[in-house]
Structure formats: structure tokens, C-alpha cells
Image (cartoon, rainbow, N blue to C red):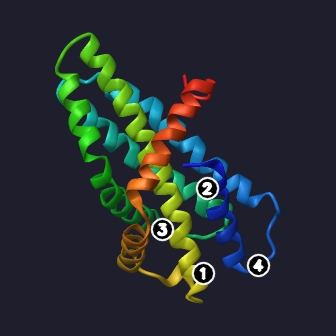
Amino acid sequence: MTDEKLMDAARALVKAMNRFVDENLPSELAEIVKTHSKGAAIAGVAGGWIPGVGGSAAILTAAGFVWTMYGRINSAIQLPFSENVLKSVASGVATNIAAYAAGSVALSTAFSIFPGLGNVAASVIAGGTSYALTLASGYVYLKVLTRLFQSGKDPTSISAEELNRTAKKVVEQEDMKAVMREAKQAYKKAKASGEIK
């Protein structure tokens, strides 16, 4: 996923909020998504070393990063969702997107069974998948919030179920294969540039 695509989603959200905000807020939102994606990648690499469950462990860890990322985004835009709502939405979005990462998870899990080179391969795959899943989840969440603000509804009065339905619609309307492909490319670029060790 290109930085510009993530910035476009952040700018759209700020515009949809239709209130005076700091002009740096779109950059701050994009940076929150990227920071959590990097953290998920590092945790995914570590999870990839767990024999037999590397890929699954990495995805579960990524879900935690998604949840905290959503909390930080909400804090930045002063949107007070409860912790339970955020957990529900984070798991709902991650579940909807995880289908696009299923092959990578299975491959990472299979490699993690073999000590040595298998663990190395599993950790690389798990790190990239965790990064991509978290980045895509952040992108989708920015789109979900934009849609909520554009609908004119008070986002604080929306239930977790309605948020999850909106997230599912966003996932269905986006080309998630392309989003995940772009997110995996962003991981490779971040890794090559040294942003992610």
C-alpha cells in the first residue's frame, strides 16, 4: 500500500469529520497506522519462530496491534468508542481481511515446523503478513470512520454490530487482494530501507 493511498484515506476522514482540525492530523493518522504495522511485523517475525503455530500466532498478535491502533486513531480524532466496541470492530475487520492472508498463514505455519531454515522462512512470511494485515486493517478503519461521518450519524451512538457491518461493506467494496498485495509490497520496501529490522 502506498503512503499516498493511506494519506488519501486519512485526508478523506478528516474532511468527512467536517470540523476544524490540525492540518497535520492526516499525517498523524497515517503514521499511527504505519507504526502499528511495523510493531505487528516485528511481533510476527518473533511469532514465526514458534513451531507449528507460527503463522497463527503472528495473526493473533497482529489483531492486538489492530485493536490498539484503532484506539490511538480514535484518541487522535477524539472519538470515544468503548474498549469493547474497539475490540469487536478490530476482530471483525481482522477476520474479514484475514481470509486474504490465509495462504500466507498456512505457509508460515508449515515452515515453522522445520527447525532452522524453516523457522527463518516462517518468520519472514509471518512478519510480512502481520504488517500487511495491520496496514490493511488501518486503511479499512479509516474508510469505515469516513463512511460513518459522511452518513451524518453520531459515531458515538453506533453499536459494535453496525460498525462491523459497515466494516464488512468496506471490505467487500475494496479490492482487498490488491490492498493486501500493496501492503506486502510496502513491507518489502520498509524492510529494504531499514525502517523495519
Residue at the location (66% across, 62% down)?
A: 8
| Mark 3, residue position | 82
Mark closest to the chain's N terminus, 3 or 2? 2
Mark closest to the chain's N terminus, 2 or 4? 2
Query: What's the CA distance linking mark 3 and mark 2?
Result: 25 Å
| Mark 4, residue position | 19
Task: Name the secondary structure under disc 4.
Answer: loop
Query: What's the CA distance linking mark 2 and mark 4?
Result: 21 Å
**Crowdedness near tag 2: few (<14), some (14–19) or many (≥20) residues, C-alpha within 10 Å:** many
| Mark 2, residue position | 6
Task: Name the secondary structure under disc 3.
Answer: loop
Query: What's the CA distance linking mark 4 and mark 1?
Result: 11 Å
Amino acid beneath label 4:
Arg
| Mark 1, residue position | 149
Instruction: State which mark lies toward you, 2 or 4.
Output: 2
Q: Position of residue 27 (x, y in %)?
A: 73, 53
